[in-house]
Amino acid sequence: MSLRINDTVPNFTAETDQGTITFHDWIGDSWAILFSHPRDFTPVCTTEFGVVAQLADEWAKRGTKVIGVSVDNAEDHRKWKGDIEKVSGATPGFPIIADDGLEVTKAFDMLPAEAYLPDGRTPADSATVRSVFIIGPDKQLKLSMTYPMTVGRNFAEVIRALDGLQMSAKGVATPANWEVGQDVIVPPSVSDEDAKAKFGEFDAPLPYLRKVKAPA
């Protein structure tokens, strides 16, 4: 079955390059981001994990844990991290799940249940394993994005989306291209009276589009 927004994400126990984890326990009360990759030692993925490492302070500022998953073993992950650090100049302190059995990849619907990795496999055999999953402290999927192998992920957008999700958890919505500090939108499910009581005065260019200052 497909994993949809607001579904509880699969719980699993898996090896990482930093030891064994149980996913829900690892998330704890934090936000979490799972980045998946079709194989270690691939060029686009190496640049991406380098950026994830460079953004360590940004993830921490947002109370967010990051974890990778790749369809190679933990020892390969440890070796690959040397390349990642060489390219990025940042130490990748986050764990990478060893999913050479495809259990996690299939649980998150990145490959079909009947998929397998043939001998002499290439990244093309797991090309769809290039996704981002943002998960809330309630262990529910809040957002997912999937990219082709040839297009590097935009981590400024990942952070912007994470900021929007954390803001929307306060009972508001965010407009197109929203950035921290900008006005937000009162959801249609909130009456004008309740909106004024909760957020104060609002601007309404349309009856169903009501903008207010972002709550602290």
Image (tube, rainbow, N blue to C red):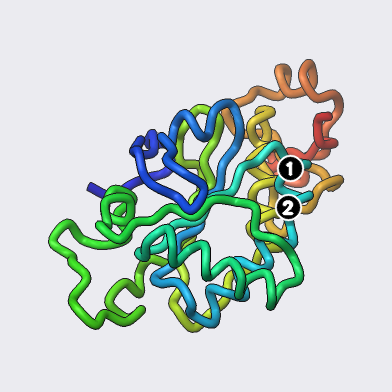
Q: Secondary structure at mark 2?
A: helix
Which kind of residue does numbered mark 2 sit on?
Answer: Ala
Q: Secondary structure at mark 1?
A: helix
Q: Please report the residue visible at 54 percent of the width from the left and 35 percent of the height from the top.
A: 136
Image position of 45 (left or right of 207):
left
Residue where numbered disc 2 is placed: 56
From this view, report whether residue 114 is shown above or below residue 204: below
- Could you say where residue 111 lies in the image, as x and y percent from the top left? 26, 62
- Could you say where residue 147 lies in the image, as x and y percent from the top left? 47, 71
Q: Nearer the viewer, residue 7 or 178?
A: 7
Dividing the picture into quadrants, the one containing residue 188 is: top right
Dividing the picture into quadrants, the one containing residue 69 is: bottom left
Which kind of residue does numbered mark 1 sit on?
Answer: Ala
Q: Please report the residue visible at 83 percent of the width from the left and 29 percent of the height from the top.
A: 216
Numbered label attached to residue 176: none
Numbered label attached to residue 60: 1
**Crowd around label 1: few <14 · some 14–19 · many ≥20 (10 Å):** few
Q: Please report the residue visible at 69 percent of the width from the left and 54 percent of the height from the top.
A: 159
- Could you say where residue 50 lies in the image, as x and y percent from the top left? 66, 68
Image position of 84 (left or right of 127):
right
Tag 1–tag 2 contact (CB < 8 Å): yes
From this view, report whether residue 79 is shown above or below residue 103: below
From this view, report whether residue 45 is shown above or below residue 92: below
- Could you say where residue 127 lies in the image, as x and y percent from the top left? 35, 74
Q: Please report the residue visible at 34 percent of the width from the left and 38 percent of the height from the top.
A: 12
Q: Nearer the viewer, residue 115 or 15?
A: 15
Total marks placed: 2
